[in-house]
Image (tube, rainbow, N blue to C red):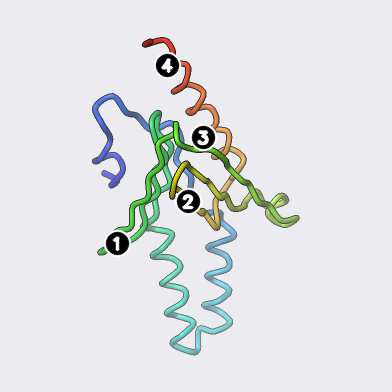
């Protein structure tokens, strides 16, 4: 069971789960091949792969959760109601290969930067849809 599934509130469910793009793995393999004869290449390959394997990027119906790390964990969360801005950045190659980065800003000190995300447009739409559903859900309760 993933870390995020363990920490969900009773009425909270996952709306979308993002992942690293395949180009991230390809870059790691190229680093290993080009620098593989040096221990640095092997270290960089495994450092990147462990980051990929241990990162969870999840949009629930109440919050955005980004968990990184295997032994020591770094968890960043933003309530959907506090998200003010989502910046999507895609280069030419990112648009062609469907990867990019997101900079998500919340009220106060909340800021989450996601440097490499597969299908960033879908993640952006999932955040917007979940925010809209949360706002309409809270207005129905009032």
- Do the CB atoms of the residues marked 4 and 3 lie less than 8 Å apart? no
Q: On the rendered structure, is 86 left or right of 73? A: right
Disc 4: CA contacts within 10 A as few (<14), some (14-19) or many (>=20): few
Quadrant hosting residue 137: top left
Asked whether 17 or 66 is in front, the reply is: 66
Q: CA distance from mark 2 to mark 4?
A: 25 Å
The label number, if any, that marks residue 127 in the structure image: 3
Which residue shows up at 26% across the image and 31% down it? 9
Dot 4 falls on a residue whose secondary structure is helix
Quadrant containing the C terminus is top left
On screen, 46 above or below 120?
below
**Sequence-earlier tag: 3 or 2:** 2
**Sequence-earlier tag: 1 or 2:** 1
**Sequence-earlier tag: 1 or 4:** 1
On screen, 102 above or below 44?
above
Disc 1: CA contacts within 10 A as few (<14), some (14-19) or many (>=20): few
Dot 2 falls on a residue whose secondary structure is strand
Dot 1 falls on a residue whose secondary structure is loop
Q: CA distance from mark 3 to mark 2?
A: 13 Å
- Do the CB atoms of the residues marked 1 and 3 lie less than 8 Å apart? no
Dot 3 falls on a residue whose secondary structure is helix
Q: CA distance from mark 4 to mark 3?
A: 15 Å
Q: CA distance from mark 1 to mark 4?
A: 35 Å
Q: CA distance from mark 1 to mark 2?
A: 19 Å
On screen, 104 above or below 32?
above
Residue 131: x %, y % from top left:
49, 28
Q: Nearer the viewer, mark 4 or mark 3?
A: 4
> Which residue is denoted by mark 1 in the rendering?
70
Which residue shows up at 29% across the image and 61% down it? 70
């Amino acid at each position: 069971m993933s870390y995020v599934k363990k920490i969900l509130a009773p009425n909270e469910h996952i709306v979308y789960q993002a992942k690293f793009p395949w180009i991230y793995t390809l870059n790691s393999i190229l680093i290993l091949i080009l620098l593989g004869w040096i221990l640095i290449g092997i270290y960089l390959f495994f450092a990147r792969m462990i980051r990929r394997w241990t990162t969870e990027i999840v949009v629930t119906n109440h919050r955005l959760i980004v968990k990184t790390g295997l032994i020591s964990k770094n968890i960043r969360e933003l309530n959907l109601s506090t998200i003010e801005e989502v910046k999507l950045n895609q280069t030419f190659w990112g648009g062609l290969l469907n990867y990019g980065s997101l900079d998500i800003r919340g009220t106060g000190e909340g800021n989450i930067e996601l440097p490499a995300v597969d299908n960033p447009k879908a993640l952006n739409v999932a955040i917007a849809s979940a925010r809209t559903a949360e706002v309409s859900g809270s207005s129905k309760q009032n």
